[in-house]
Image (cartoon, rainbow, N blue to C red):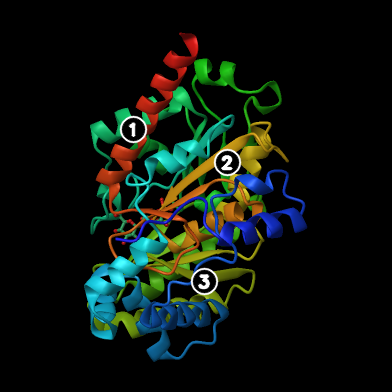
Amino acid sequence: MAKASVVVPEQVGAAAAAAQVGCPCPGTTLFPYPPPRAGIAVRRKCLQAAQQLELGAGLRGGWVESMRASSPTHAKAAAALAAGVDEEHAAWMARHPSALGEFEKVVAASKGKQIVMFLDYDGTLSPIVDDPDAAFMSETMRMAVRSVAKHFPTAIVSGRCRDKVFEFVKLAELYYAGSHGMDIKGPASRHAAAKSPPHNKGVLFQPASEFLPMIEQVHQRLEQATSSIPGAKVENNKFCVSVHFRCVDEKSWGALAETVRRVVREFPRLRLSQGRMVFEVRPTIKWDKGKALEFLLDSLGFADCSDVLPVYIGDDRTDEDAFKVLRRRGQGVGILVSKHPKETTASFSLQEPAEVMKFLLRLVEWNRLSRARLRL
Ligand SMILES: O=P(O)(O)OC[C@H]1O[C@H](O[C@H]2O[C@H](CO)[C@@H](O)[C@H](O)[C@H]2O)[C@H](O)[C@@H](O)[C@@H]1O
């Protein structure tokens, strides 16, 4: 398999581009610029369909195609039809190599920098399951995240409401950005708070608080309107609402998409996007997981700093906003969790939560050894 190198010709372009936008550390980017194209015709078509959906311009067929794209099984089948699976996968892996396989390059990029860890929850720390209320993370994963947080400032960035994701993760020493980054809170544990920068104590940021009553309303409307579609599940995520279709018969997907769109049209200040077998309804404000990442870096005292290396691991379309921010800053490491080729702005990949755990533990071990070596 062709290996991607940190020192590739495109990075000269990256450095130049970074310099043009005034990036403080143009020589240190891990991101080739312009971003490599996945070249997956089927995926791109599906992405366009998803964008149409977001713009509200999609036809019924476009929605269903986009809904299919959010299922790895369908996507895999579609990609397999479009090209040889192995070739497609190998080419994709060459563009987005395994963060475990290229571990040395990842850590080399952190030389002299503070790593800040950003972790998505569903599909990254916990496996995807049919019932959103049963998406538990394993105790071993919890221990891995706890260890990471002992070594690096660590944040969970999730589409879930903050309280719910905290119930799953149960680690008070972390930062949490729930509702796709619209509900940010600093560590609750006294020990972690004591270690936080002084200006960051008790950080709490909720840029969409005025939308709370509207989200309540749309949640009720969606529950009502989708109640006749078996398997549809509406989840109130405080500043946004998810409508799940993982358990809906594919024959009803068109009807569900139309119903959701009809309801969302009643609320011009809300918008519709799509995640993994889920519609996401959220405020039209310009705030997403990428903005949350930047907010947290600033809160941690790393605004306009070149001596920080944000590492963001996520599996979903909404995580792309964070990957894009890293690429624009020319700073950090974006890692997509996916077994299948997907169009992404992330530089690296990991296949599944089990690999995420291995990566986290390896990072902890590497940091422990590097510190021990410094003490010698
Ligand atoms: O940003 P995330 O932490 O990845 O949250 C995104 C959505 O995740 C959850 O839904 C996804 O996981 C479920 C459990 O595995 C699965 O059943 C569903 O199909 C996935 O879309 C969560 O329930 C949503 O509210 C989040 O927005």
Alpha carbons under labels 2 and 1: distance apart: 28 Å
The local crowd at label 1, few if under 14, some if 14 to 19, many if 20 or more residues have their Cα within 10 Å, is some
220 relative position to 167: left or right = right
Is any part of residue 232 visible from this angle? Answer: no
Which residue, given by chain and number where applicable, does mark 2 sit on? 184
Which residue, given by chain and number where applicable, does mark 3 sit on? 272
Residue 123 in percent (x, y) is at: 33, 53
Label 3: state its secondary structure: strand
The residue positioned 24% from the left and 55% from the top of the image is 129
What is the quadrant of residue 41 in the picture?
bottom left
133 relative position to 313: left or right = left
Instruction: Please tell me whether mark 2 or mark 1 is closer to you in this view.
Output: 1
Q: Quadrant of the C terminus?
A: top left
What is the quadrant of residue 251 in the picture?
bottom left
Label 2: state its secondary structure: strand
Q: Earlier in the sequence, mark 3 or mark 2?
A: 2
The residue positioned 34% from the left and 39% from the top of the image is 359
Which residue, given by chain and number where applicable, does mark 1 sit on? 362
Which of the two residues, 207 or 143, is positioned nearer the viewer here? 143
What is the quadrant of residue 284 in the picture?
bottom right
| Placement of 295 over or under 346, stated as above or below | above
Could you tell me the amino acid type at mark 1? Answer: Arg
